[in-house]
Amino acid sequence: MITSDTNNSERHLEIPTQTEFKVSRSFIVITILLLVFYSSLIFGATIYIDPTNTSSNQNGSITNPYNSWTKFTIQSGNIYLQKAGTNFNTSTGISINGKTNVTLGMYGTGSKPKITSTGSGNHIINVSNSSNIIVKDLEISSTGTWVSGVIIQGTAANNQIDNCIIRKTEWGIRIITTSGGNKVLRTTVNDIKDDGIYVKDVANIEIGFCTIYDINKKYLVNTNESYSAGDGIQLASTNNMYFNIHDNIIDHSSMGNKFCIIAWGNNYSGIIERNTIIGAGNKNNSGIYLSPTTKTVTVRYNNIKDGNYGIYSYARVDAYYNIFSNNKNGVHTMAGYTFNGRNNVFYNNTVSGVSSASSTTVTLRNNIFNISGTTSKAIKTSGSVSSNNNVFNTQRSGFINSYSTLTAWRTATGNDQSSVVGNPAFVNPSAQNFQIGSASVAINRGANVSLVKDYYGGSVPVNGNPDAGVYEYRLTKSGEVLAEADSLNSEAVKEMVLYPNPSIDGKFAIKLGKLYEKTEMEVFDMAGRLVKKVTVTMTAEGTLDMATYPDGGYLIRVDTGDQKKTLKAIKNTL
Ligand SMILES: [Ca+2]
Ligand SMILES: [Ca+2]
């Protein structure tokens, strides 16, 4: 029995008088109402939208959804889901202002529901002064002239755009806030007039698993860079910004000018990793531009190709296990800045692999420089350079600074005493496969540079020293895979990738690298208990739904029959 008198606990045991009973009963009713009210704040209501619903008395239930986003006001704590395969036309956009814990998404099965703006306007989805807002599983585009597909602005922390398609606006996504914790994940941004994703003033930002292409379409109107200045991702902040740009495909090759990724601000730092970054050197656009910062940017495990510059840097850059291929210039470092390059492949960059202005500090270890044509240079630095344990496919007039032989360069500078001129024996460079074969001079050429994983995910070192380049060779002379202490790192399972990670809804996918007849996935919690087991058949991708399991870390043991691998997964719904 609940009682309003908390001063005398013994009264719980007394039989209430009629008056007391009435008081208690009304108190219970109020308490229940309050519980319902607060649990709606905590757990939220789900409101359904189906633009094709013509029935009357629409109430937002799944049996009688609203047919328009204008028939209700968005409330904190609620989930708003539009039916799969439907289209909602809007002339005003959808605004979320001063709210927390709101999710916009889809229900049912089929293609992502579309929110299409007509005429002209500012932001199709406008998240302002709000936090913990999730916009997911929606296709957001315009048939008219709109500024942003999605904007996050004002005081706006921990918001996410996840698994959306955003098209046909001036900017795809804009995040303009000094707050942190905002993320853009698994989202496709294309057919955009200016920047694909524009981020300003943030404390930090994560952009991962996105596909960004066909941006800066203003280039079709006017090729002057002051007019058509669209980048794939533009990051601008003097708020000690930290960024994590990972696992994206950013293809700027359809339009000229600018960059796949540009970072601006005098005190930013960050990581750019596992991205495919495609420029167009003949249209004057480049991979990564780092404007002046006093801090370090780590660039690792990327494939950066076809641009004017792979990296153009006014930063301290730590770059390892990247492929720079078919750019005009692989990496260029501006006066006063630093480049530390370990285990990269510089392949057929037509002007130079690594270059720098005066007053730079360039350190090169365990790289492969492959030059072709008659004029390209491996190294063309003007500041101080420390270089060793590298592979050069050939030597010729002026190929390292002004020197024409490795011996002359060694004698004059003392550099590259343990480097070699010889065949790197790439497996299939025209198909972007920069693994090396058994004849490669890069095997065990490297020094220990404290790196433990190669571009392909294999452990380093194998069979003695690290190899030069992006791949640690792991076959014996007879062609068998070397036995490793960790047998989970063999060839066939290196491509196994779990994503998204962390997952915000508990749903994970595991790319298996190839089609398997039967794959078992066992999920263990961090105490080592088996909590789930799933078997999938005839697929190259396993899916795991951990939606009903608590947040936290899990180990997923994947067994494809001939290979086993254990992957770490993190579920974080907050
Ligand atoms: Ca721009
Ligand atoms: Ca080795």
Image (cartoon, rainbow, N blue to C red):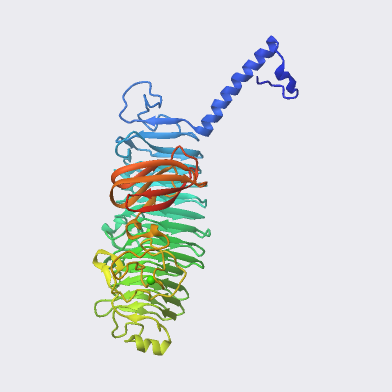
Q: Nearer the viewer, residue 159 or 492?
A: 492
Q: Is residue 179 visible?
A: yes
Q: Nearer the viewer, residue 504 or 478?
A: 478
Q: Quadrant of the N terminus?
A: top right
Give the quarter of the image for residue 495.
bottom left
- Above or below residue 42? Residue 286 is below
Tell me which image quadrant ligand 2 sits in: bottom left
User: Where does the image place residue 262, in percent across and percent down from the top left?
Assistant: 40, 62
Give the quarter of the image for residue 85.
top left
At x 73% / y 19%, what residue is drawn?
Answer: 11
Q: Is residue 187 visible?
A: no
User: Where does the image place residue 125, in percent across and percent down from the top left?
Assistant: 40, 42
Q: Is residue 427 left or right of residue 46?
A: left
- Above or below residue 411? Residue 260 is above
User: Where does the image place residue 178, in percent across and percent down from the top left?
Assistant: 52, 52
At x 39% / y 68%, what residue is drawn?
Answer: 462
Q: Is residue 6 left or right of residue 47?
A: right
User: Where does the image place residue 249, in percent across and percent down from the top left?
Assistant: 33, 56
State the residue lying farthest toward the top: 18
